[in-house]
Image (cartoon, rainbow, N blue to C red):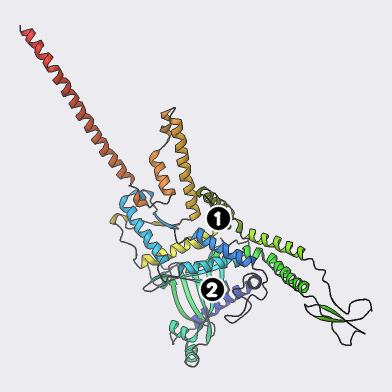
Amino acid sequence: MPILAERAKKILSYQESLESDRHNWDNLWQEVADHSIGRRDFKTVREPGTQRTVRIYDTTSKDASNLLAAALHALLTNPQSRWHDLRFERDELNDLEEAVLWLEQAKERLGTGFNRPGSGFATQIAEVYQDLVTFGTAVLFVTDDPGFGPRFCALSPAEIYIDVDHQGRVKAVFRKYKLKHWQAVDMFGEEDIPSIAAAAQKNPNNESEFIHHVRKRGLPVPGRIDAAGMPWESIYLSTKEKKIVSEGGFHENPYLVARWSVDAGEMYARCPGIDHLPDQKMLNAIWRTFIRNIEKAADPPLLVESDGVMPGSQISVTPSAQIVVQSDGNSDPVRYLESSAQLNLSADLIETRSKKIEKGFHSEIIQAFQDPRMTATQVIELARLAQRQLSPVLGRMAEDLLNPLIDRVYGILSRRRDFPPAPDFLQGQDLRVDYVSPVARAQKASESQAILDSFAAAQAIAQVDPSVMDNVDLDEAIRAIFDGNGTPVKVLRPKADVIEIRREQAQVIEQDRQAQELQQTGETVSKLLPGIAKLQEVNAA
């Protein structure tokens, strides 16, 4: 018991140090939430349903972030296309017919793990992208729902504290969150949280704070499949009781922490929402002033003359206000207080800042994709442009989020034995789980078109010199075209089958040739026989 108490103390101290280190980030994220997006709380504690947009007068950042998040969803994890792939580490196996068929079935099962009803992947990954472009750091929690399969949950960055190794990879995650008392009892049992269990009898809906700590083990126990043998350690702690209430493990890290762009020496990331926070705050200030000036122009304050300024009277420049002034005998007794605000200048500033923010969120490229007049070639070129501009981000997304995500889901499904049984010769073979970007598929499609264009040019030259076609490997060309167009592998025959078919065809052709030669020889002999007979008669005479 003293050992567990000491461990709990060290873990809580570790979490508190990470929380202290993140102080500045919490302040920055809260500013983004208050001035740009109107969602998430970090330093401010508000009740659910509370108005969070009181400081937002312009929604440029919010609209642009929604557009970019939706575009990332379509580019990276489009549910309408396959964005993950399976291959054997030994390349020669990927050409065998049985292996190819098994891979196709396994890919379909993997896709089902993401798209099955109740998994929540489509909605939760959309939340992840929204946090990613707004706050720079986003978290997806992937757990194994007993009896169902993978389940996905997007978590607020406010709950997550991370630590990284010397290579910048996340090695430890703390989630600090609250559970209602009845939820805690249901999850951990009454014996491990006695004070909370007692409180649950009186106020089951009151909340207590817990910490879930997941870290990479240094040396997992070889050969064990229980919690001690899993690569990732899992510990739940009650901050109220300052004790460990549950221990376990994971085969893969269930907390997938996606980061937009990490500066050297920092653990959390920056993103368009953070980079353009000053522009958004300026837009809000300009709009606030602009609206006040419009109100004054439409309904300016009134100057009302009196024999003298009344004692205690106040000057107000709000719309419809009345300001009592001393009469000079020459002015109208009631007149408007004219405003010198330059409304056109404010409108120009708003347009300039809005365009700057939209450019920072790559809105120009994203909106171009929505043009129904675009040709397939234009879509491909735009996809290339989008990949060039977003290449660093796409690379980090693959490393931080998508590859670990596929590994996690594949691991859950394989342990549930949801994949079809593999043929005996594939048992024990290592699989490679790859992320396949739709942008990369667009590139391959452009390569397919390039092959067709080059082949057409080669055919034109072949009209003059047919030997130029000897430069083209037609078998590899057709396979590259099928691959670039995303054609299922099972449509193509394995190379060994193609070789066998051609061998049989060659045998048939050779047999036909020999038969034709025999027929021609027979016809020639039959034509010569009458002449030979006459020659024999002459010789006999």
Earlier residue among tags 1 and 2: 2
All told, the count of numbered labels is 2
Residue 217 seen from this side: no
- Residue at the outermost bottom position: 202
Q: CA distance from mark 1 to mark 2?
A: 44 Å
Eye-nearest disc, 1 or 2: 1
- Residue at the outermost top position: 541
Residue 174 — which label? Answer: 2
| Occupied quadrant, residue 467 | top left
| Occupied quadrant, residue 396 | bottom right
Q: Image height check: is 534 above or below 328?
A: above
Q: Which quarter of the figure is the C terminus placed in?
A: top left
Q: Image height check: is 276 above or below 503?
A: below
| Amino acid type at image mark 1 | Asp
| Amino acid type at image mark 2 | Phe
Q: Residue 109: where, in percent of width, then height?
A: 37, 62
Secondary element under disc 2, as helix, strand or loop, is: strand
- Residue at the outermost right position: 329
**Horizontal side, residue 93 vs residue 270: left or right:** left
Q: Which residue is mark 1?
A: 371
The crowd level at tag 2 (other Cα within 10 Å; few <14, some 14-19, many 20+) is many
Q: Residue 495: where, in percent of width, then height?
A: 33, 44
Q: Judge by depth and name the residue closer to the eye, 372 or 502.
A: 372
